[in-house]
Image (cartoon, rainbow, N blue to C red):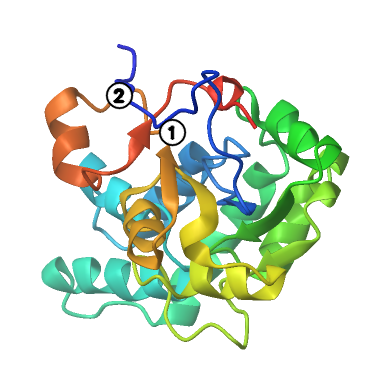
Amino acid sequence: MGREKAGAAVLEDGSMPRPAACLFDLDGLLLDTEPLHARAWQEAASHFGRPLARTELLSLRGRRRQDCVRQVLGWIAETNSHPPTAPELLAVRQPVAEALLVLAKPMPGAEGLVCRCSQRGIAMALATSSSRDAVALKTAPHPWLALITARVFGDDPGLVAGKPAPDVYLLAAERLGVNAQDCWAFEDSPAGAQAATAAGCRVFVLAPLDLDACQRRDLYPASAELINDLGEVQV
């Protein structure tokens, strides 16, 4: 099933207005890591007797590790009278995640979009829920991601709240010296799209292919522009 594409504002010559900056999520947007994250959370939760439903795994997308831990521990506690501690949960989850994430491939069109932004002098920042160490692990096999030098991580000391709060996008724009309202934000998760929308960005969403039209309408902000491939975006 393909994705729906919302109508995008264009100039008279058919091009899109140039953004002050492009702000990128990482997982599921630039790198195809979300199925790998889901597998790691599933294995960790199942280890403690609480397999996760597809909708629950989707709700973890785009959120900081510590926020996901709190959520998964809450789910486990519903059926387990002696739930694990956060370190015990992560002791199961992290080795699985670290073994898988280095294998992540770029999302279609991701490298081309980042390179076009760089060639055209458009400022870029990474606005991710992943920690600094996790980003280093995932991006090491992908030298083209070094073109994005401004980065806000999920464990950034300047970050007050994670997605769906707008803080990560506001902070990324601030570090580039631009207004968030003049930026384009690229997301795949509902939490991330909500964060970018709340920050005032123009939001492009690369939603999972297995979501139907009703699910997209329910999960993503109405103002978000749904795209099929990052290669569609003209900068």
Q: Amino acid at mark 2?
A: Asp
Query: Which x, y percent locates residue 176?
Result: 70, 68
Q: Residues within 10 Å of mark 1 (few under 14, many from 20)?
A: many
The quarter holding residue 73 reads: bottom left
Report the Cα–Cα distance between label 2 and label 1: 12 Å
**Which residue is tagged 2?**
210
Mark number for residue 233?
Answer: none
The quarter holding residue 119 reads: top right
Q: Nearer the viewer, residue 136 or 9?
A: 9
Q: Would residue 128 appear left or right of 139 to someone viewing this image?
A: left
Q: Amino acid at mark 1?
A: Leu
As displayed, is residue 168 above or below residue 7? below
Q: Residues within 10 Å of mark 2 (few under 14, many from 20)?
A: few
Residue located at (32% from left, 25% from top):
7
Q: Nearer the viewer, residue 84 or 234?
A: 234
Q: Would residue 50 appear left or right of 168 to someone viewing this image?
A: left
**Which residue is tagged 1?**
206
Query: Which x, y percent locates residue 157?
Result: 62, 88
- Decide if residue 53 is in sight here: no
Residue located at (48% from left, 50% from top):
40
Quick one: quadrant of the N terminus? top left
Query: Which x, y percent locates residue 39?
Result: 45, 43
Residue located at (59% from left, 47% from top):
19
Q: In terms of secondary structure, where does tag 1 sit?
A: loop
Quick one: quadrant of the C terminus? top right
